[in-house]
Amino acid sequence: MSTAPLWLVAVRNELRKAVHRRALRLTWAGFVLVCALVSIQILNAESNDGGPLAMADLWPSALGGLGGLAGIMAGVAFALLLGSEWDWRTGRQNVIDGLGRGEWFTGKLGLLVVIAGAFVTTHVLTTGIGVLVVGEPLDGGWIELWHVKWMLGLLAGLTCTLTIALVTGLGTSGAGAATALFLVWIAAEPLMSAGLREYDDWRGWIGEHLPAGTFARLQQRPTWDPVFAERAAADPELAARMVPASATMLEALVWVVILTSSAWLLYRRRDL
Amino acid sequence: MTAIATIGLRKWYRSGFSRTRAVDGITFRVERGQIFGFLGPNGSGKTTTIGLLLGILRPTAGEVELLGRSGRRGLLEARRRTGATLETPNFYPYLSGERNLRLVARVKGAPDADVDRALDLVGLSDRRTDRFAAYSLGMKQRLALAATVIGDPELIILDEPANGLDPEGMREIREIILRLADEGRTIFLSSHLLAEVEKTCTHVAIIKKGQLIRQGTVDEIVETGFVYALRADDPAALAEAARTFPGAREVWTERDADADVFVELAAREPAELNRFLSGRAVFVSRLVEHRRSLEDAFIEATGDAAGESGGESTGEGSTG
Ligand SMILES: Nc1ncnc2c1ncn2[C@@H]1O[C@H](COP(=O)(O)OP(=O)(O)OP(=O)(O)O)[C@@H](O)[C@H]1O
Ligand SMILES: [Mg+2]
């Protein structure tokens, strides 16, 4: 007899299921491929003066090379995994078998964090190969502190992005609908944001702080590169447009709380 | 001890401006040790009722008690001592039957040996490593039954366990159910296979359009009063003579495999009837107490068993 708490059983079961899931394997394999392409680009990089390349200068290409692709691919994978529970009616069977709704939900949150971790690790390791092969530890540095912070930013941003898929997965009733809605959200939010930013009042403020945009900022260079912070300190106009890392983190946290609670409320009260 | 009790259980589905009264105030009790058949035509609310028992549907009104427990926490705890299927076998198609059962065993806190035993019970041991998606319908049904016995449950709830099975498969399922009941478990099963239910169940309830219309032991439901089936060389003379018997309430003829004439008496006195008939020079070659089949009782109770009866739908708009 196992004595593990049920929420932990739920998380473990989610991981056991996920590793066998072709939708996840395929998206992950596609992601490895994309990361490898970035890595190859780095391998082909040459310095302006033909001299050796500094590792510290290469990390930004590795970490920023994917744009928003990690969020889209991991999000699609997660939405598919979540949505299928409705298609196969396994989500209801899990509860029939004795998982509480809270424990089931916790299992999915565990899966969310692990998928985010796996994608970021894949990203850093695969693109990092290019950096390590081509780059030289000039000035004694393999890597700088802000690169590490950026990596954590990637992890935080991706985890946050997946909470959007959590909402679409638990708010709809199938893998197709969950995935489609997630993609629509990701595609439509920037348009909505641009529209809102036309206004100078509170609407403009909201336009700048929508969830996918906030989560994306966590994964982008300007948030973590000290050069940008320095420039902003000297240039009030730039400072007005730049959101400091700490503020972005706080914003993201607020959105995660809102999105996760919405997902829970959608799930908690629905007929399975 | 009560295994299942409901009080005024109700579930109305709303879609747009109409609502469906899928379950409309159902109260019943299943005592421990019973094999309880839950009967009803298509769309009468069987699956919805079970969904309410299992806590995956939110009731519009009413209460559920499972294994003596109620309330959110209590029902959750009781569900872990219950094995159940709902509507279709619900498993992960890309995992093997065995892996699917292991996931269930972990949730139930049951040892892995339970998985082997369950697979053995339903005869799926040699196909245990095949993906669920590759199973035939019968195998899927058997896997669902196997999942319900994991964790040594006190109560087993089955929604149409024999759905889509061939006669051989049905008999196997029936035998397994009887074996599980012999081990002291309470069984609650929904079905519209009346012959199966008659062979398996001790108690039945009949639901129609979301409401319970009959419940009792199988004997009570098929009980007809004192009806006897008779046969003689000259059926017309037999009927005529029987009509003059003082204790006869009703006499009718019917094409039946082993009777020409049916006689309903006011009391259990078939010997009197026989003596009376032979006094009138009518000699019966056969006289047996007539039992209806459960099917007859069901059709009589539900009226239109063959048609989709459907829940009551109204266009009144949402209720407050
Ligand atoms: N999710 C739903 N939304 C709306 N109406 C529903 C829903 N599920 C069931 N119903 C309706 O509720 C009624 C009862 O359905 P239910 O599935 O409980 O019947 P059943 O007795 O199990 O039928 P069957 O023998 O065909 O399995 C039907 O009229 C059905 O259309
Ligand atoms: Mg049904």
Image (cartoon, rainbow, N blue to C red):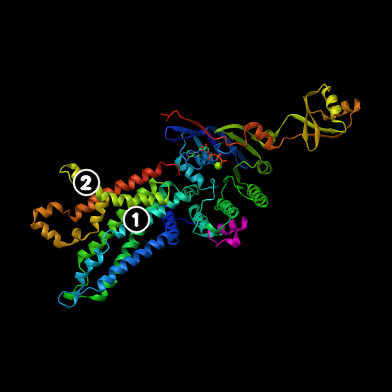
Residue B127 % position (x, y):
58, 61
Residue B7 % position (x, y):
52, 33
Residue B80 % position (x, y):
51, 48
Residues drawn in magenta: B114-132
Horizontally, residue A145 falls left or right of residue B66, namely left
Mark 2 lies on residue: A195
Q: CA distance from mark 2 to mark 1?
A: 25 Å
Residue at x-position 43% and y-position 58%? A12
For marks 2 and 1, give the one nearer the viewer: 2
Circle 2 SS class: helix
Circle 2 Cα neighbour tier, 10 Å, few/some/many (<14 / 14–19 / ≥20): few
Q: Amino acid at mark 2?
A: Gly
Circle 1 SS class: helix
Badge 1 sits on which subunit?
Answer: A
Mark 1 lies on residue: A75
Q: Amino acid at mark 1?
A: Gly
Horizontally, residue A120 falls left or right of residue B294, namely left
Residue B306 % position (x, y):
62, 37
Residue at x-position 66% and y-position 31%? B300
Q: Is residue B31 above or below residue A66?
A: above
